[in-house]
Each structure stands twice: as C-alpha cells, then as structure tokens.
Image: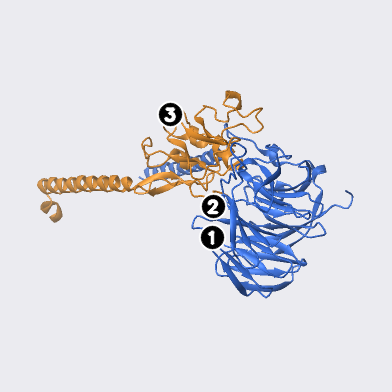
Amino acid sequence: MEKDKTYNRRDFLESGMRLGLALAVGAAGGLAISKATAGEWVWQIDPFACTQCGRCADECVLSPSAVKCVHAFDLCGYCDLCGGYLIPGSNEISTAAENQLCPTSAIQRKYIEDPYFEYIIDEDLCIGCAKCVKGCASFGNGSLHLQIKHDLCDNCNECAIARLCPSDAIKRVPASEPYLVKGGFLEPALG
Amino acid sequence: MIMKEKGLYIFLSLLAVAMVAIMVADFDFGGAEKGKGNPYALDIEEFRSVDPSLVHYRETRNIRLPFEHPKAIAYANGRLYIGADSFLQVITPEGRELLHVGLSASPECLYAAEDGRIFVGFRSHIEVLNGAGEPIARWEGLGENSVLTSLTLKDGILFVADAGQRRISRFSAADGRLLGHFEGQTGKGAFQGFVVPSPTFDVAVNADGELWVVNPGNHRFEQYTAEGELRTFWENHSQGIDGFTGCCNPAQLAFLPDGSFVTSEKRIVRIKVHRPSGELDGVVAPPEKFEENGKAPDIAVSPEGIIYALDLDRRMVRVFEKKENL
C-alpha cells in the first residue's frame, strides 16, 4: 500500500513519457545506424563463384533484373567464332537470330578488323540469364560475366537472388568497391 | 485459474509448433528453389562427350608432384623435366627424382636439350642451366611486355614464343645473342600475324626438323623457316572433336615421332592426336579425364610415342600409351 501511494498517476505518466521518448530516440538512432550501415555495403556477384544457374534473371525483385552481363574487354579474344555470342554448333558464323545464343539479342557484334570482332552488351535488353556467360566460360576466355548494376539495384536487406543462389556467389561488398570485375591478360578466369 | 494456465500452455505449445513448421517449410522451400532447373541452361555436354572408339590411348600411370603450381614439362635424354613453383625437378619416366633445384622465379616454360643444357623461360627472360641445374647464363632484352610461353631449339637457334608481344623471338643457343623476331606476317593481306588473346602460345619442332607455331586465335598451325617465312599451314575451326574452338586453342603442342600433332586444349580440356595432314587421328584423353573448366595440360612426348601430360589442376604427370589393339 505504501508503494501505491508513492507511485501515483503523475509518476506513471512521467515515466511513461520518458520511456516513450527513449524508445523514439532509440528507434530513430537505430534507423539512422541501419541506414548508414546499409549504405556502406551493397550486393555483388563473385564471378569466380557464379555457376550460371539462371536465377539472376528470374528471382530479382526488379523486372528486368538488376543483374546484367558485363564484358571484361581486356580478357576478350575478340574472336570471330565467339562461344558467348554463337549457339554451339551454329550453322554459320553470322548475326542471324537463329545463330545467336542470347535469348534477347542483347549482344551486339561489331567488326573491328580481320579477324577481330567486338562484343558489346546492350544493358536495356540484357536480362542477366548468364547463357552467354556459360558459353564464354566453356569455349572462350571467360570475359563475359554477371554483375549487379548499382544504378538499378534496390540494395534490399535480403537480396532475393542471394537467398536462392546455389553457389552462394552473391555477397555483401563495401559500397566503395561495389563491383567484382574480371580482367587481366595474365589472369584469365579459369586458365 | 488452473484451466486458464493450461489453456495458455496449450496455446504457446501450438504456437511453437506452428513456428517450427513454418521455419522448416521455409527452409525446405528455399532448398527446393535452390535446386530447381535452369530455364536458360546452355547444355554443352555433347561437346564434352567423346565416342569411346575415338579414344586411342589409355592412362597407364601417373606421378604425383610435390608442387603447388606445376607449369611446364619437357622430355629429353630419357628424363622428364618439370618446372613448378620456383623449382626445376628432373625425374625418370617412372617418377624417381634425379634433381630438384631452386630457380630465381616461377618458370613459365622450359626446353631440355640433348647436350644436357636446360633452357628455362620466365616471364620476360631466359635462364640456361647445366645438367646439374646450375645457372650458366641469363638472356634478357625481350621487353617488359613479354610473357614467354614456350621454347624450342632447332639448328642452334632457340625459338621463344612471346604471348605478350605476339611474336617468336630467336636467340643464338651458343651465346644468347638475340637474332630477331617474327610476327607471323608474310606480306600485306596474307595473314594477320599471331592472334594470341591469352597467354597460350606454343612453338615446337617435329622429328623432321620442321618449326611449327600455333596461331591460337585462328586455330591454325603454321610452319615457318628459321628466318620466319611461312611455308605451310592448316587450320580447323570447329566446336566438335575434330577441330579447335575458343579464343586460344590448342594451348599446347608436341609431336609424335611420325610427325603427328599432339594437342592440348583449354576450357573443354582434352588431348588429341592429329595426323601430319591435319585430320583428327584419335583422342588421347577426353574431357572426362580432367577437371571441368580446368587448365590445359602441358604435354611432352618420348621417342617411343608415350605422351606425358602435366595436369596443372591435379598436380601430377599423367602417362598415356597407345592401346595395343590399334
């Protein structure tokens, strides 16, 4: 009974307000910290771990996916018979649709000089299916590879693709170094 | 009161069971999703599989190596020479070690001469060792962009394949004098020169003394005079077993005593024999023998026609001999 006397309605309201204020400040601080932390890390694909499973095209919350094929030109052989551009066993080396590996014709083939051709990715058309990546890795130097484009990515707390990636190739990387791009004449992807 | 508590316990138990069920279902669902098929799959199995009747060799033994990064193999004087990490190892064909010496850096390629000298190619220079593995000369002057990938000797000239500068350099084997280079161009419009998109560029001499250079970007074998004039060539672009594909194949070249080409390819790793005229003769080791997406093995051949493949991924020498019934 003594206790009830010292803890009256005014005290209850005061402590309630203090608690509410503390919670509000804490929540605001937590939100700020989480925002700041989220800004320091972004999702990215490790191209050496990627197994070209096709999930990146379909599982991203964005449509089309924020995952795009990128081209490490210093690794590319600029070949006429390009394993990333042509369907294996295609009936001829040409830009005809039936010979192209990409389901959306997102790779442009450009003649440079005999015998060199340049392959450029049209990001607006690329859906990140990795079909060309598999072809390039199987027959070529592995210069085509997938990356999450940060001008498109929402940087979700839990990346929908990372959750399903069978090779755990998608990981958080510092926002200051947001891309894991292949490259280097002496360091071809897989030999 | 007791009834109320009992009800609460039942409710909490059901809630816990439901939560566990949801978590398990979510886990299972995620696992199933991870394993689901790929609607964009590119099936290359037909290019990896080889008709067993085409495989003319069998693997008779292998020799495990004590190195992290084997790089090059050569055969001469009844011995195998292996460059790896920063060491040179000489072993008998049965695997008994005869010599194990340290090198100044990581070797890229090597050539063992009949006179006992061992030429070791590093990234941009060459060192010559005597039969005991002691350095006797160092040849430089190739340039900072050099990436040496193969060495061979013919009529006192050491031919050096330089993938970085896409040319063959020639040194006097007697005194290390740089005699010149050739880039595979035989005149305007004839050829584009050596197309070397990655550091795989081989040069070898066959039993008839013919100098052959692999032009890997063109899937072409080119024969040159010692001065660098093109004499003949053959090529075969194909993603099938009969030819070569990708940016830079074949990655390695050696010759059988009858002049047949022994080739080693990267990406879809395989070793084949092509007749001197260029047609496919048979397969030494199909892709299933190697790691998927592995590195192209370096190859050496004995005068008896035994093929030694340096498996860079499994770190061993694999020995292939022709099947008796062929």
Separation of residues labelled 2 and 1 (CA atoms): 9 Å
Q: From the viewer's perspective, is residue B300 above or below residue B286?
A: below
**Amino acid type of the residue that numbered disc 2 sits on in the rendered structure:** Gly
- How crowded pointer 1 is (Cα within 10 Å; few <14, some 14-19, many 20+) is rated as some
Check if mark 2's residue and mark 1's residue have beta carbons within 8 Å: yes
The chain carrying label 3 is A
Residue bearing the label numbered 2: B164
Colour seen for chain A: orange
Residue bearing the label numbered 1: B124
Q: Is A169 left, or right, of B160 in this rendering?
A: left
Q: Secondary structure at mark 1?
A: loop
Nearest the camera: A54 or B89? B89
Q: From the viewer's perspective, is residue B3 above or below residue A80?
A: below
Which percent across, then down, holds residue B298? 67, 56
Check if mark 3's residue and mark 2's residue have beta carbons within 8 Å: no
Image quadrant of residue B51?
top right
Separation of residues labelled 3 and 2 (CA atoms): 35 Å
Q: From the viewer's perspective, is residue A116 above or below residue B67?
A: above
Which percent across, then down, holds residue A84? 57, 36
**Amino acid type of the residue that numbered disc 3 sits on in the rendered structure:** Asp
Which percent across, then down, holds residue B238? 68, 36
Kindly tell me whether residue A92 is visible in this rendering: yes
Colour seen for chain B: blue
Nearest the camera: B36 or A93? A93
